[in-house]
Image (cartoon, helix red, strand yellow):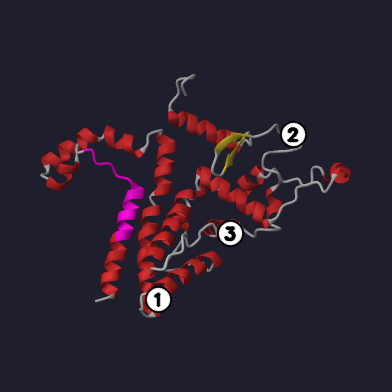
Amino acid sequence: MRTRHVAIATASRVHALLRAEGLALPVPGVGTVVAEDRNSDSPRLRTRQPKNRQTQSATQGTVRLNAEWITAAGVAIADAEGVEMVSMRRVAHLLRTQPTSLYRHVTSKEDLVARMVEHALRKWSPGVEASDWRDRLIAGHRELWRVFRRHPWLAQQLSVTRPQLLPAALAFAEWAIQTFKHAGVSTEEAFEAHLLLFTQIRGMAILLEPEAEAEAASGVDADTWVEEHMSTLRDLTHRDHHAGLQALVGSGYELDLDQLFERGLGLLLDGITSRLHS
């Protein structure tokens, strides 16, 4: 950007094109990195695993796929570019194989996305063990927020009314129910309290992917966007006599999703605790 004097949006589109051509690869926790030469025998995302030097020439060029490799590739694409960019063809391109070869391990894109959800949720853990049930819930839901942050596409793929019957999702629900039951409530109350917390956190996490997409497309982050529209917001709040919003405009307040998550979690647990003991 500094050298060529281009906008962030232009640079973002270039990154997307490089990934689509296989010249760059999304690496979880790192970012987009330059792929090795197409003619190299050792691509960064290895799909060739010779047993030993004697059999290397015989096995070279054979793509050894499995469901876990395919799922990891789908997650890498979704993390870097959004779940809408995930397709069997795109995954095959990343793994340097043909789309038809994927169907021996994954039946469809829907099957792939379900596996991706399971893969992402398996990264969740209960957090730091604590003797108090409230502290355990705080630690565990902070871990859930961390998983949502790591995979911005994940929240929109999860349903409450028609929940995915995935081992990791059921394990989280069971942990939450059993933790709430330590407060001495019924299973039904524990389940409803779990849903209340989960839907609140999921609702906040749904904001993550659209914001990431908007920033990639425009090259403008949320704080900069607000600053650019501050004068219009100030005029509207004064004209329409919105005293509460007017007090915020120009006060230096910045919306921080991580801070909002912490406050929301605390307020909900305070309310649940009060209700359970009433």
Residue denoted by label 2? 40
Q: Is residue 274 left or right of residue 202?
A: left
Cα–Cα span, label 2 and label 1: 56 Å
Q: Where is residue 10 in the image (x, y as percent from the top left)?
A: 47, 29
Dot 3 alpha-carbon crowd within 10 angstroms: few under 14, some 14 to 19, many 20 or more: many
- Residue stretch rendered in magenta on the structure: 252-266
Tag 3: amino acid = Arg
What is the total number of numbered labels drawn onto the structure image?
A: 3
Instruction: Tell me where residue 250 appears, x and y as whole percent.
Output: 19, 36
On-image quarter of the C terminus: bottom left
Q: Residue type at mark 2: give it.
A: Ser
Q: Which residue is drawn at 47% across and 51% down?
A: 153
Camera-nearest residue between 79 and 21: 79
Counting residues from the N terminus, which is met first, the one under dot 2 or under dot 1? 2
- Let me know if residue 260 is in the magenta part: yes
Depicted 126 relative to depicted 239: above or below: below
Determine which residue is flagged by label 3: 115
